[in-house]
Image: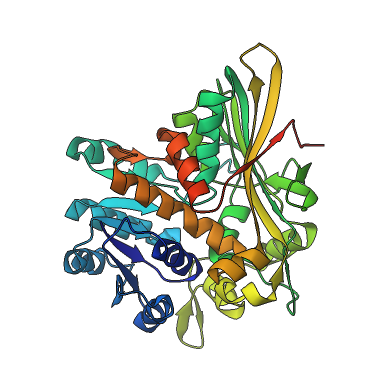
Amino acid sequence: MKILVVGTGGVGAAAAEVARRRDFFDRVTLADLDVARAQSVVDRLDDGRFEAAHVDASDAASVSALICDSGADAVLNATDPRFNPQIFAAAFELGVTYLDMAMTLSERHPERPYEETGVMLGDAQFAEHERWRERGQLALVGMGVEPGLSDVFARYAADHLFAAVDEVAVRDGANLVVEGYDFAPTFSIWTTIEECLNPPLVWERGRGFFTTEPFSEPELFEFPGGIGVVECVNVEHEEVVLIPRAVDCRRVTFKYGLGAEFIDVLRTLNKLGLDSTEPVRVRGVDVAPRDVVAAALPDPATLGDRMRGTTCAGTLVTGTAADGSAKAVYLYHALDNKRSMREYGHQAVVLQTGMNPVVALELLATGAWKGAGVLGPESFDAVPFLELLAAYGEPHGTVDGDPRR
């Protein structure tokens, strides 16, 4: 297998480090608008199977040309989701497998944004499902950690732990601290603003999809890995779109442990219009306020040496066990930043995200996962994934009972 990775920021670089330890591929081309950044990743890897290249992810023709030049069988999109349409289209045009970790962006309902959906996450990609399926070509979307591993957990629970599933509740929390900064997000602030300030999405059987106010329905959730109790709130996320497509359940939600200070910062950015992606003219230059915010904050990929603590991604499933009793289980993956830096040289949040598409690529390369169309991780057998993740040295954990308080 030959792989093209578009984007060599924190997640793309972490995925490359994970892949370096495996032998299922022949070559990985690491591509970026800044080819020097891609080359620096290749230099650190010191592995002849990796090469650097230039690509403009905003230009489908540029991506298509690089797919041809690299001879790629699969394209891993490790960019912000605003570039999904171009990379997705180029992969289809050239007949190669496509993977991403975040789906095409949503657009809120024009009149009732906090009650009804407008354009939902991934709508543009799912609209192309039949074309991909008829061609026998796979687009594996939302294959990061959340979405991604969280969806695998949901599928595993439904297939092996429950006779009937009530709720699939994805919950993410951490006790990470970045020393030396008053405010330093551990993941892309561009993406964080997008998902946190958009109307959160909920799915219920019989009602379908609906939205709520940002940061709504707070709950206390006790996370494992020494993290403890964290307040989680509703946030827009792909799992709510993906999981009901393949897992029979009554309700799907996503809540994120952001913390009061982080929420206050996001609300302030919103009030000032600094979350906007629409360019404004400043001294003769057109610039999007959100891009300015991103440029002013430290690159999350560079924060590992200043970070301490643990991050946890997981899926709480409730329902009925085979014996008819009520059952709840939280399946999770927790990663301590100190270990992540020591073993991989990348901070925990980007490493946890970048590892899962590599596992998926290996399953596709070996034929353990097969499919055609635009599919999420919950559409595949979860067992091979979880077994291979454990073989990578990252087994998942479980907590019996409902950790919500």
Residue occupying image coordinates x 30% and y 45%: 366
Residue 130 at x, y = what percent?
25, 35
Whether residue 184 is visible here, answered yes or no, is yes
| Residue at the outermost bottom position | 283
Query: Vertically, is 57 above or below 225?
Result: below
Q: Residue at x 40, y 35 (%)?
A: 380
The residue lying toward the viewer, choosing from 36 and 263, is 36
In the image, taking residue 222 as reference, residue 299 lies left or right, namely left
Q: Position of residue 213 (x, y in %)?
A: 67, 44
Q: What is the image's colouring?
A: rainbow
Task: Give the tally of numbered discs.
Answer: 0
Q: Say above or below: 374 vs 66.
A: above
Tell me, yes or no, if residue 219 can be seen here.
Answer: no
Q: Is residue 279 above or below residue 198?
A: below
In which quadrant of the rendered image does the N terminus lie?
Answer: bottom left
| Quadrant hosting residue 157 | top right
> Which quadrant of the figure contains the C terminus?
top right
- Quadrant for residue 400, please give it: top right
Closer to the camera, 34 or 174? 174
Q: Residue at x 77, y 53 (%)?
A: 227
Q: Is residue 327 left or right of residue 36?
A: right
Q: Position of residue 187 (x, y in %)?
A: 58, 64
Does 327 sit left or right of 28 as displayed? right
Q: Quadrant of residue 404?
A: top right
Question: Which residue occupies the extreme top position in the image?
Answer: 324
Q: Position of residue 219 (x, y in %)?
A: 78, 41
Residue at coordinates 22% horizontally, 68% vertically from top-left?
66
